[in-house]
Image: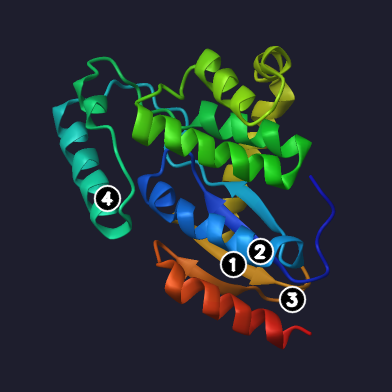
Amino acid sequence: MSPPHTSPHLIYFADPMCSWCYGFAPVMQAIRAEFGPRLPCRLVLGGLRPGTTTIMDTDAKTRTRAHWDHVHEASGQKFDFTFFERNDFIYDTEPACRAVVLARRQSPDAALDLLDRLHLGFYAQNRDITQADILADLAADIGLDRAAFKADLADPSLQQETWQDFQISQQTGVNGFPTLIAGTDPAQEYALVTAGFQVQQRIIPALAHWLSQQA
């Protein structure tokens, strides 16, 4: 875990296999581009469905497809709907979350970069990001060493660190993703930026106003 920030910063609760987080990805990219190091962001993995062991049935696919349609309509993000032709997919979000936590050990930016790449791979390219080989391939796409990354994915301490993220989300009271909060001192209350999808045109001005008040 990195030291707590004592200057303006964001904490982003998200999951690589959360479709609304994928819809929100361009907004997070815009935040990073607009504010850069003035407003660093730490990613906490939410754990949407960690440890799932059952294969998606027809009802689950129907519900998931409806979510994807809504996200597409709200955000304009592209989806590869051939995903729903899979017959043996298990929607376990833990491996992808674990991969992002591993990237976070490199840097907060690496975690956000890998989150973006996993979102794109899963939703727009129909890549199976529950599989270690695919996770390592996508990590290599953002410049991480593929062989080392795949080996480190099996580190038991990494799994423990990932589940600690899930516990942080629960203890913080975050029960939906994406959730973005802003603060200056961990001992003080955080301001809620958004709980759920929101458009860039509302988020950027609100953050700029908040940041101006912290000077």
Location of mark 2 (residue)? 10
Q: Secondary structure at mark 1?
A: strand
Q: CA distance from mark 4 to mark 2?
A: 26 Å
Looking at the image, the residue that sits furthest to the bottom is: 213
Furthest residue to the front?
A: 33
Q: Are the residues at dot 2 and dot 1 in contact (C-beta closer than 8 Å)?
A: yes
Corner quadrant of residue 111: top right
Earlier-in-chain disc, 3 versus 2: 2
Is residue 51 depicted above or below 137 in this figure?
A: below
Residue 167: % across, % down: 60, 46
> Depth-wise, is mark 3 or mark 2 nearer the camera?
2
The disc at residue 72 is 4
Q: Residues within 10 Å of mark 2 (few under 14, many from 20)?
A: many
Q: How far apart, in angstroms, are the residues tagged by discs 3 and 4?
A: 36 Å
Question: Image quadrant of residue 56?
Answer: top left
Q: Residue at x 56, y 19 (%)?
A: 137
Relative placement, left or right, of 27 versus 7 is left
What percent of the width, then of the height, locates residue 52? 40, 27
Q: Earlier in the sequence, mark 3 or mark 4?
A: 4
Q: Please state if 118 lies on the left or on the right of 89 as rendered.
A: right
Q: Is residue 197 left or right of residue 29?
A: left
Front label number (4 vs 1): 4
Determine the residue positioned at 68% across, 79% down. 211
Q: Residues within 10 Å of mark 3 (few under 14, many from 20)?
A: few
**Mark toward the start of the polypeptide (4 vs 1):** 4
What amino acid is found at the position of numbered circle 2 in the picture? Leu
> As displayed, is residue 198 above or below residue 76?
below
Q: Which residue is mark 3?
A: 188
Q: Residue tagged by mark 1?
A: 181
